[in-house]
Amino acid sequence: MGDTGRARARPRRPGATTMPRLALYALVVCVLSVVAAVVSFVEGTWWLGIVWVLLAGLSSNMCWYYYKRTKAERGHSATR
């Protein structure tokens, strides 16, 4: 009755880092937008390709920000 079906969390190794979820989503968006930009340029719609390149730049910055923010938070909480 008390089993919720959730898997138990495995204990982390000391010093092991995982990719933050928002950073991972931003990385996926970045990769997909780069692919879309290449396809747009190949098909000849350069203006749409530029929009995809701008989106790739934005999402790569978001990925970097969320990764660094989470890494800093984990480092700060470990020192307490």
Image (tube, helix red, strand yellow):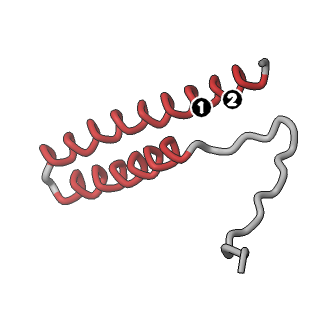
The residue located at (33%, 34%) in the rendering is 58
Question: Residue 24: percent from the left, percent from the top?
Answer: 52, 47
Mark 2 nearby-residue class (10 Å; few <14, some 14–19, many ≥20): few
**Residue that protrudes farthest toward the bottom in the picture:** 1
The residue located at (35%, 34%) in the rendering is 57
Q: Please state, as top left, top right, bottom left or bottom right, where the N terminus lies in the image.
A: bottom right
> Residue flagged by tag 1: what amino acid is it?
Thr
SS at mark 1 in the image: helix
**Where is 78 relative to 58, above or below?**
above
Picture quarter containing residue 70?
top right
Position of 27 compared to 37: left or right? right
Mark 1 nearby-residue class (10 Å; few <14, some 14–19, many ≥20): some
Q: Please state, as top left, top right, bottom left or bottom right, where the C terminus lies in the image.
A: top right
**Where is 60 relative to 31, above or below?**
above
Question: Residue 15: percent from the left, percent from the top?
Answer: 83, 35
Picture quarter containing residue 19?
top right
Picture quarter containing residue 52?
top left
State how far apart marks 1 and 2 are (Cα): 6 Å
Q: Which residue is mark 1?
A: 70
> Residue flagged by tag 2: what amino acid is it?
Arg
The residue located at (53%, 47%) in the rendering is 21
SS at mark 2 in the image: helix
Position of 73 compared to 37: left or right? right
Task: Look at the numbered discs 1 and 2 and tell me whether their residues touch, using CB distance below 8 Å.
Answer: yes
Q: Which residue is mark 2?
A: 74
Question: Residue 39: percent from the left, percent from the top?
Answer: 27, 58
The residue located at (71%, 24%) in the rendering is 77
Res 28 label: none
Question: Residue 59: percent from the left, percent from the top?
Answer: 38, 39
